[in-house]
Structure formats: C-alpha cells, structure tokens
Image (cartoon, rainbow, N blue to C red):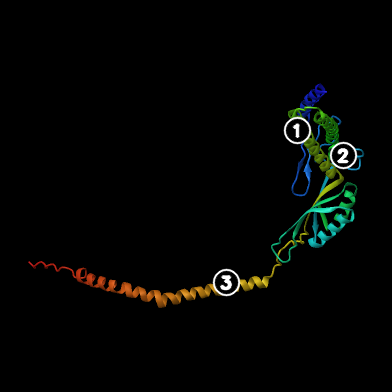
Amino acid sequence: MLVVGVVLLGACAAGDGSTADVETGLSSDSGGGEGTVEEPSSEDGDDSAGQRVDLEFTDGRQIIRRASLELHATDTRVAFEEIVAAVEAVGGFVADANVFPTSGEDEQPRISLVLRVPVDELNTTMSAIKDSADEVVAESQSAEDVTEQFIDLEARLTNLEALEVELRALLEEVRQQEGSDPDKVLRVFNELTSVRTQIEQIQGQLDHLENLTALATLEVQVTQTPSAVPIVDDPWTPGEVARDALRNLITGLQGAADWVINFALFALPMLLVVLGPLVLVGLVVYRKFFRRRPTTPTPAES
C-alpha cells in the first residue's frame, strides 16, 4: 500500500506541473463585471473578436456578445429613463451609469450607460432603445467565440476533481495505517489542498465565462440633439449699420474736440511756461551779439 502511495504522490507531483497553469487569459474588469478573453486559436476560420458577425448563427457555441449605440435625444434624461425601462423589461440591468454635468442651463447632460441584457433579447432591446432616441449616430455589434476555452477548462476541472477523489482516499488510508508517518500525511494533505485551490480557480473562470456568454454587454452614449444652425447667424440690418457709422463719427468728432480743448487749456499754457523764458533769453542774446554789427571807417576822399 505504501508503494501505491508513493506512485500516487509521484503522479500528483507530475499532475501539479501539468495543472498548475490554469489561466486562460481571462481577466476581470472591476468596473462592471466585464471581462476580456483572449481569442482562442482556431483552424476552422472562426470570426475573430471585434469583427461584425451574424449573431443569429451561433447555435451550440459559447459566444460573448457586445454591442454599442451612440444616440441623439432632445431630452437626454427622458431617454435615460426609457432605456432603463426597456432593459429591465427583458430581465437585464444597468451595470454602470454616468451623467456628466452641463455648462449651461439650457443644455442636456451627456449620459453613458453599460447595460447587461440576456443574449436572446439583445436585438429586441437595441430596437427599443433606438426608438427612444431622435437619431442613431453609430451602432456596432461584435462576438467572441470562447467555446474552446470552455472545453479546455471543463476538461481540466474533470481531471482535477478525479485527482481530488484519489487524494482524499489516499489521505484516509495513510491516516489509518499503524505507525503512519506524519510527513507522508502532511505531503498528501498539501497536495490535496493545492488541487482544491486549482479546482476553485477553474470553477471561478468557468462561472465568469458563463456570465459573459449568458448576458450581452451593451454600451450606450446619449447626447443632446444638435439644434439647427442657420446659414447666416444674424440677418443684415442696414439701419443698424448706419446708426453704428453715425455713432462712430460722433465719437471721432468728440475725440478731436477733446484733444483741441486739452491742448488749448493744458498743453499750450505748459509750453508757454516752460519755453517762454528760454525764448526771451534767446532773443536778448541775439540782439546783443548778433544785431550789433562793427562799424568800418569810410575812406577819405582824395
């Protein structure tokens, strides 16, 4: 029996190396429970993630479906209420909602929604949501085939569960032996704990994939419908143009009159006060030195 235990322990050690890597590229998004799954390699030419696909021809496959809508609505708040009602009517729910503030009182807020709806009701829900808007700006759908990941995870889970049963039986047998070695019991127990941890990890990944395939993710952006813009912003008014011209003329004349008054009452007196004495000194100097010419004696008559 000890030989059987050693063989099983060796198999467990080998199985630990083969089952330790149970990650399948599945990462959980903390925002709304959404995940990203790596596209499995396929030799059958399956559509890759993100491409437009016909969502009706997916019988027997595990498909993650995503869609998005960009809408215009006159009243975004009313559109928001209608969208929530349409989603709840088919058994879906709002995973995330954001209402962005506006810059003016007359503006409607921009609303962003992440919705989870049953995959069978995705097209019906999208039609109801589009009916609540004034205009559909953009629409897209995508599908990702994760069937191979399901098969791989389920196979690993089956093998680990079978190994867990054998380890439990071995642990019970080692404990019942007379003079059982505590080290052997501890080794089997640790291996059993490792297998149980891997089982729970794979089961969690399967549950997450099942959630993604059972409920489609629909992202909706709702913004206010732009108002019609006229060809000419303001109509031409000749009377207003004439009034502006007269107003400018009067303003210009007033400015010129102000300049003359300021020059006559302020600038000119300042010039006289500052330059007057200098001019007088200059005149005195001129008369004293330049106006007096030297007298030359006249030659005597012979």
Point 84% across, 45% down: residue? 211
Which residue is most to the top?
3
Q: Disc 3 marks which amino acid?
A: Asn
Mark found first going from the N terminus, 3 or 2: 2
Which image quadrant for residue 76? Answer: bottom right
Callout 2 secondary element: loop
Dots 1 and 2: beta carbons under 8 Å? Answer: no
Point 83% across, 23% down: residue? 1
Q: Which mark is residue 190?
A: 1
Report the residue marked by disc 2. Answer: 62
Dots 3 and 2: beta carbons under 8 Å? Answer: no
**Neighbour class for label 2 at 10 Å: few (<14), some, many (≥20)?**
many
Q: Is residue 247 visible?
A: yes
Report the residue marked by disc 3. Answer: 248
> Residue 243 location in percent, x, y?
63, 74
**Neighbour class for label 1 at 10 Å: few (<14), some, many (≥20)?**
few
Q: Disc 1 marks which amino acid?
A: Asn
Distance from Cα at disc 3 to Cα at disc 2: 77 Å
Which image quadrant for residue 239? Answer: bottom right
